[in-house]
Image (cartoon, helix red, strand yellow):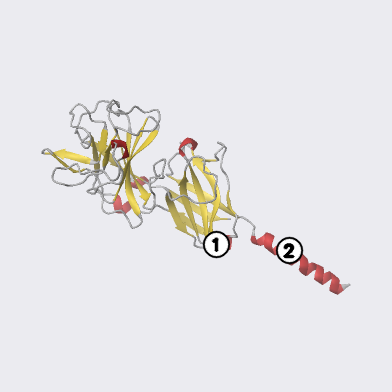
């Protein structure tokens, strides 16, 4: 009787072990300066990194007041990953495309942090102190595709001094594995201007100017500048050709993006280094300021529960 009882107990323990091993790890998050995102433009996803690969810990968006919401618009109170807490080495936050329904992280990595004693600080690929002294300006022009002084619906991170284009963004080489990226938010659409290594470098996008490949040099002396003419191939709902309005009110951003992206991103990274706005009355080749937002870089504090 005793032997049968012990065998039964051992069998029950063996059967219970897989269930215990598969118990989800619950994670508490505290969000700081994580920019709002509308589900129409994508969403955030938390990932638990294990030796067996990444495990999703939940998809969410952020409201204007910083509160996390589910994709259905309800308050997001819990995050859980299908992995034992002891197997989680690090946590990461990505930005996913609209309609994403898989368990594979996108290449638009935003924040990451390794776990120490069950806690992690998810931070960007650049520290605020490293870009705190950076300055930036932009101008409006169409230097690549037109030579019409009445047409300036392109955004360039440059200055125009003594009839020459000069770098407008004073940024050093981006950290290893990352690139700076320019964006224009116009009529609710995110228009990329391309990714670049530093403020005096060429960018890798010229699709809206009607060209392919990198943006051509715009300085007669041969010095490249990041930026874009908005002429062709614009998203649906935006005018094409040279009749695009003067971009009044459009927001201009410089973000930090993961270098492995190949123009898959739909919306700018929340890691915003510079932000500015096209004034209601703009002038061709005039310099407009970019505010340095490095003091408000996003951070997520996490703790396993």
Q: Is residue 63 above or below residue 7?
A: above
Q: Secondary structure at mark 1?
A: loop
Residue furthest toward the left? 162
Classify residue 138 as left or right of residue 256.
left
Classify residue 161 as left or right of residue 208.
left
Camera-side residue: 164 or 23?
Answer: 164
Mark 2 surroundings: few (<14), some (14-19) or many (≥20) residues within 10 A? few
Classify residue 33 as left or right of residue 132.
right
Residue furthest toward the bottom? 3
Q: Considering the image in quadrants, where does the C terminus appear?
A: bottom right
Q: Is residue 184 above or below residue 181?
A: above
Q: Which of the labelled discs sits on residue 52, or is there none?
A: 1
How many numbered marks appear? 2
Q: Secondary structure at mark 2?
A: helix
The quadrant where residue 151 appears: top left
- Image location (x, y in percent) of residue 290: 27, 39
Q: Which of the labelled discs sits on residue 148, or is there none?
A: none
Mark 2–mark 1 Cα distance, whole angstroms, equals 22 Å
Q: Considering the image in quadrants, where does the N terminus appear?
A: bottom right
Compare marks 2 and 1 and give the one earlier in the sequence. Answer: 2
Residue furthest toward the right? 1
Camera-side residue: 262 or 161?
Answer: 262
Determine which residue is flagged by label 2. Answer: 15
The quadrant where residue 143 appears: top left
The quadrant where residue 246 appears: top left
- Image location (x, y in percent) of residue 260: 39, 53
- Image location (x, y in percent) of residue 116: 49, 62
Mark 1 surroundings: few (<14), some (14-19) or many (≥20) residues within 10 A? few
Q: Is residue 137 above or below residue 23?
A: above
């Amino acid at each position: 009787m005793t032997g049968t009882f012990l065998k039964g107990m051992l069998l029950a323990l063996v059967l219970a072990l897989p269930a215990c091993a598969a118990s989800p790890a619950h994670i508490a998050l505290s969000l700081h300066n994580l920019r709002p995102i509308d589900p129409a433009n994508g969403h955030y996803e938390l990932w638990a990194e294990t030796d067996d690969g990444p495990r999703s810990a939940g998809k969410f968006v952020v409201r204007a007041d910083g509160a996390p919401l589910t994709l259905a618009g309800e308050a997001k109170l819990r995050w859980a990953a299908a992995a034992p807490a002891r197997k989680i080495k690090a946590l990461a936050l990505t930005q996913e495309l609209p309609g994403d329904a898989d368990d594979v992280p996108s290449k638009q990595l935003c924040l990451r942090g390794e776990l120490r004693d069950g806690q992690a600080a998810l931070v960007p690929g650049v520290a605020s102190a490293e870009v705190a002294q950076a300055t930036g300006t932009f101008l409006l022009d169409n230097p690549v595709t037109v030579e019409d002084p009445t047409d300036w619906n392109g955004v360039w991170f440059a200055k125009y001094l003594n009839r020459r284009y000069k770098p407008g963004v004073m940024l050093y080489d981006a950290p290893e594995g990352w690139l700076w990226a320019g964006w224009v938010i116009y009529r609710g659409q995110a228009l990329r201007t391309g990714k670049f290594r530093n403020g005096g470098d060429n960018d890798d996008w010229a699709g809206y100017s009607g060209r392919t490949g990198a943006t051509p040099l715009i300085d007669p002396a041969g010095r490249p500048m990041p930026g874009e003419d908005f002429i062709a191939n614009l998203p649906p709902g935006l005018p094409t050709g040279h009749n695009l309005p003067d971009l009044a009110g459009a927001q201009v951003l410089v973000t930090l993006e993961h270098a492995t992206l190949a123009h898959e991103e739909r919306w700018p990274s929340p890691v915003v280094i510079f932000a500015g706005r096209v004034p209601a009355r703009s002038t061709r080749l005039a310099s407009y300021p970019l505010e340095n937002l490095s003091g408000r870089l996003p951070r997520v504090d996490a703790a396993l529960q």
